[in-house]
Image (spheres, rainbow, N blue to C red):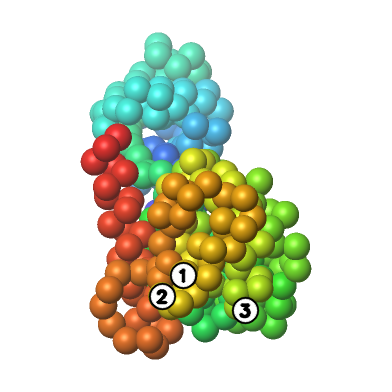
Amino acid sequence: MSRLNFEDYLSAVKTLQETGKTFVSVTLVNQQGSSPQEVGARALVSAQGLEFGTVGGGKVEKRAIEEAQKMIQAKTPHIYASWNLQKDIGMTCGGVVSFFFELHEQNHPVTIYVFGAGHIAQELVRLLIKLDCKVTCIDPRQEWIDRMPPSTKLKTICTDQMKELVPSIPDNAYVTLMTMGHGTDLPVLIEVMKQRDRFAYVGNVGSDQKARRLRQDLLDAGLPAESLTRFFCPMGESFGTNSPVEIAFSIVAQILKTRDQVHELA
């Protein structure tokens, strides 16, 4: 495999990892006689089929793809296979090819919704996309959305109807609120708390004073008193200063702590 092709291969591996897909790398490690590809040929296969590269095309590649997909289903870590192209594959050429298959199983990324794209959100998103996360950032201000970093792990939505998106948030998501202020946080928080049992984590940026006001507003909106302890406000662990980046670090710490507690209970 040439330097350029190998760089393309590594880029394809990175893309599959970032999108959270489990896949198998297939490498042609030996050949005897006639074969449709040279030693070193590589392919990447997911449950959906061939994602990148080729190890020969035709019948031999079809067999390799099927073998890789069986590995994904059975979670087999790796196998070595040698096939006679004529006897085992049904090809006219009579060579023997050997492949090494390696499973790259991806963890399911944490799904995080960030309502708000201001200073704290800018720092928070930049930290989250370094982790095994899928992040959705929502804000009515396009100019703030545009400041978000480009990443395959990040989806941005510009809308002034933020609360309308709450029903579409998937189960077990982590929901964080840091919009322009109390008036824009509250409508979203009310909708989130109505569905609190669906979410792994709910947090709202704010001071102790804001926390008291939010909890009273939730009561006034008809939320049961027992729900008032089921979200974090102030959000984040108790360390650091009030700078946006340190608040963001404290929120990430709290999210990871919650994630690990959920995994221990599972």
x then y, percent, for residue 142: 72, 77
Other-residue count near label 1 (Cα within 10 Å), few / some / many at <14 / 14–19 / ≥20? some
Residue 180 tag number: 3
Mark 2 or 3, closer to the camera? 2
The single residue placed furthest to the top in the displayed view is 87
- Determine the CA span between mark 2 and mark 1: 5 Å
**Pointer 2 with pointer 1, Cβ within 8 A:** yes
| Image coordinates for residue 198, horizontal then vertical, percent | 51, 41
Mark number for residue 208? 2
The answer, for residue 177, to whether it is visible in the render is no
User: Which residue is pictured at 57% across the width and 58% down the height?
Assistant: 218
Asked if the residue at tag 3 contacts the one at tag 2, i.e. Cβ–Cβ closer than 8 Å, the answer is no
Say which element carries label 3.
loop
Between disc 2 and disc 3, whose residue precedes? 3
Q: What is the C-alpha distance between the residues marked 1 and 3?
A: 16 Å
Q: Secondary structure at mark 1?
A: helix
The answer to which of 206 and 125 lies nearer the viewer is 206
